[in-house]
Amino acid sequence: MLTTEQIAVQLPRVLLDALVTGGIYESRAAAVRAGVEAITALERGQQTDRAIVAGYRHTPPTSREHGSATASRRSTCSAADRLAVGTATGALPSGSASCNRSMNASASARVNFPAA
């Protein structure tokens, strides 16, 4: 179990009270805790992103790997589009804008990370 520590923080009461009276959080402490947890999760994600970028800078993908990734993306978009056809969810049919944007961006240029 994690060790906890009580801290004092001064915030405008209206910030936290709105979250509690709106039923979003059970208490002001729960709202603050959720905020700190969200910031921590965001920072962990950014650390992962930085590590991935560093890895690609150190060892860029080969042409073969790039081709495999493009083929995989095409396959995923095609499968998602096939599932979307005829659904009542408002999903886009085959050739959806999101998949087209993804494929066009991939086809136009490789990602070139700036030098560190």
Image: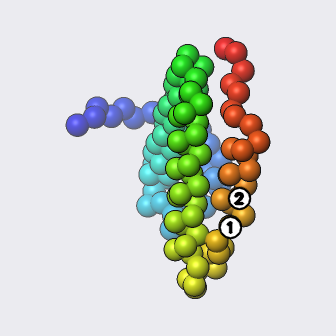
Q: Quadrant of residue 106?
A: top right
| Residue corresponding to mark 2 | 100
Amino acid at the residue labelled 2: Asn
**Which residue is outermost to the right?**
108
Residue found 52% across the figure and 74% down from its top = 83
Left or right for 72, reference 108: left
Is disc 2 in contact with disc 1, using a CB cutoff of under 8 Å? yes
Question: Considering the numbered disc 1 on the image, is that residue within a helix, a strand or a loop?
Answer: loop
Q: Quadrant of residue 60?
A: top right
Front residue (pair 13, 68): 68
| Residue corresponding to mark 1 | 95
If the image is split into quadrants, where does the N terminus sit?
Answer: top left
Residue found 48% across the figure and 60% down from its top = 25
By what rule are the colours in the image chosen?
rainbow
**Which residue is outermost to the left?**
1
What is the C-alpha distance between the residues marked 2 and 1? 6 Å
Residue found 60% across the figure and 19% down from its top = 57
